[in-house]
Amino acid sequence: MEGFKKFILRGNVVELAVGITVGAAFTGIVTALVKDLITPLIAAVFKTPDFSGISYTINGSRFAVGDFLNALISFVIVATSVYFLVVLPMNKFIERMKNRKPVDPTSKKCTECLSEIPIAARRCSFCAQPQIEAEQNAIV
């Protein structure tokens, strides 16, 4: 039971549960938008009172074209929203993080003993050897 408790209380599981809950709520909103606003607009073009009621029958089988189109429109709206509100900003953020300039170093390796010393040091604090690179950089 202790392992299950640790698993449930891990951050990833909780975040996933919150994401699914918010996604389901968002899907409900989009479905209502399509059913209550977009469908009536499309139905007005086809001059039918209820777009979701559009269907045809072949050999006793009913094909609910309107319901399928409602689901398709809902899917396109959700997919577009997720792409533009989550995927695209995340890709830009990751690209920006990859293209960051490296921070200027504050230390370097001693040419003799390879110890870390300050970048402007002229002599190593560990082996007392003069640092030729530092002297050349100071002259230039």
Image (cartoon, helix red, strand yellow):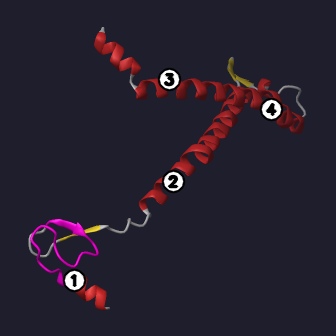
**Label 4 vs 2, first from the N-terminus:** 4
Q: Which residue is mark 3?
A: 17
Q: Which mark is residue 114?
A: none
Q: Which residue is mark 4?
A: 39
C-alpha span from label 2 to label 1: 38 Å
Marks 3 & 4, CB-CB < 8 Å contact: no
- Name the amino acid, label 4: Thr
Q: Residue at x 71, y 25 (%)?
A: 64
Where does the magenta region start and end?
115-132
- Name the amino acid, label 2: Phe
In the picture provided, is 82 more to the left or to the right than 7?
right
C-alpha span from label 1 to label 4: 74 Å
Q: Residue 75 occupies which quadrant of the picture?
A: top right
Marks 1 & 4, CB-CB < 8 Å contact: no
Residue 131: image location, x then y, percent? 17, 80
In the picture provided, is 50 more to the left or to the right than 29?
right
